[in-house]
Amino acid sequence: MERCALISVWDKTGIVEFAQKLQAQGFTIISTGGTKTTLQAAGIPVTGVEEVTGVPEMLGGRVKTLHPAIMAGILARRQEPEDRSALAALGYPLIDIVVVNFYPFKQVVADGGATFSEAMENIDIGGPSMLRAAAKNHEFLWAVCDPRDYSRVLDGLAAEPEAARQVRRELALKAFRRTSGYDEAIAGYLAGSVGDAPGDFPRQLDLSFTLKTPLRYGENSHQRAAFYIPSSSTSAGVAKAEQLQGKELSFNNINDTNAALQAVREFSQPAVVALKHTNPCGVGLATEGDLAAAFQRAYVGDPVSIFGGIIACNRPVDGATAQLMSEIFLEVIVAPGFSKEALEVLSVKKNLRLLQLPEINTRSSSWDYKFVEGGLLVQTPDDADDDPRTWETVTQAAVPEDAFTDLLLAWKVVKHVKSNAIVLAKDGGTVGVGAGQMNRILAAKIAFDGAKEKAAGCVLASDGFFPFDDVVRLAATQGVRAIVQPGGSIRDEDSIRACDELGIPMLFTRVRHFRH
């Protein structure tokens, strides 16, 4: 009995070789459009879809495969004599393999440069329809949407019936996931263009994720884990980084590296973020061309906590910086690049993971998600414009001009520290961090305890307002020269009065940066 394979693909990777092997096994190849041209150019005999349907392509190629001669050949139930008789009466072939992939809608709209009409024109109709039909009828035929599966199909054709059936079922699952993700991308694009709910939050949020890799274990060794990425993601996150050396990334490595990337993106000047357990433990800034100085400031900020930490740099790592990094134990270094000298220096640390992410300074504009049991919290990212020119001096004493750089540094860092959070900064680097406490005075005490003598002359940033004047009074005993905080407490006057009494200038941002 003649066997037929229908092939119509946008991505033509490996399609000629696959079609040649199918032909060698006796398959008749049915095709159309650019795929037909490609196969014929390779010397493969091809039956045009129009020869099967008796109808030429219409509407500039918009209509070609959606015809009973094609869809019936895909959906016919082989065990039903009536189905087979209906096809035979009309002269329609049974189709045994459907090989399709779709117009590149996701790629076309990814950078935001496509016009609306261009986006709509790149919505595939026939491909998803045929693929869904083949997947529905996978008991009898192969639904193929990924060039990486061509070899699996060839092996499956020669396999025992039960083994072949299992492969067809797995391919059907992939096919429905592919069509679901494709529809999700289109719906997401349209939702973004019309705003289908108050605040532009979609009325229905469909998230599709693809397995990137299983992980050795989760947050703890007794937990199983895996790393998934959004099927339609284009963000320049840790998933896009190229690993140049080192051990396999762990669950905690990925989570911490993500937090370090978000923090280092706050800065336009050369910056190094040292991070531990998703909290920055040291952040250093420097002038252009002196990343080593930025790393040194991050290290001095907390030379204890940086041990076994994650380092994120927003400039390529050079030899001098790599030499400083090599002197301590680190888990991960992520940067836009590494010089040849840096790679040579760090290569002796065989387990040290080096991640190269050229787009490290590209911010993601996606929603911020927090999964809770039975639901999902969605919010816009915390990307408020932190402009010191909009801050309000609320004390009698004015902030010295030379303190603003450190105040902005502390304010940008406290945004990435778990609340309640206090950050101390001086001379272009952090000197103390108090993270994740149930009350603000305890966070301040932890920050000062870490800073010790370095606290003298520092500035202080708080992610939330002061409900009491206790933080101000503690800061005065440690030599703090200026404070920045959101303000907004019903007892703001207590803190302002204390600052005036103690001669400490204080700024209100009127923006808070809770991070839970």
Image (cartoon, helix red, strand yellow):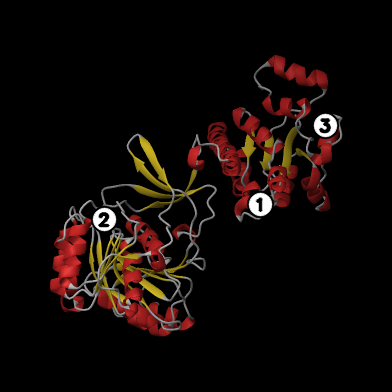
Quarter of the picture containing the N terminus is top right
> Which residue sits furthest front?
396
In x, y percent, where is residue 428?
A: 33, 78
Mark 1 → mark 2, Cα distance in angstroms: 40 Å
In x, y percent, where is residue 73?
A: 73, 27
Q: What element carries label 1?
A: helix
- Circle 2 residue: 419
Q: Which of 411 and 388 is in front in this view?
A: 388
Q: In the drawing, what numbered circle is on residue 108?
A: 1
Mark 3 → mark 1, Cα distance in angstroms: 32 Å
434 vs 351, left or right, is: left
- Circle 3 residue: 52
| Residue type pointed to by label 2 | Ser
The disc, 3 or 2, on the residue closer to the chain's N-terminal end is 3
Q: Is mark 3 on a helix, strand or loop?
A: helix
Q: Let me know if residue 158 appears in the view.
A: no
Q: How crowded is mark 1: few (under 14 residues within 10 Å), some or many (20 or more)?
A: some
Q: Let me know if residue 80 appears in the view.
A: yes
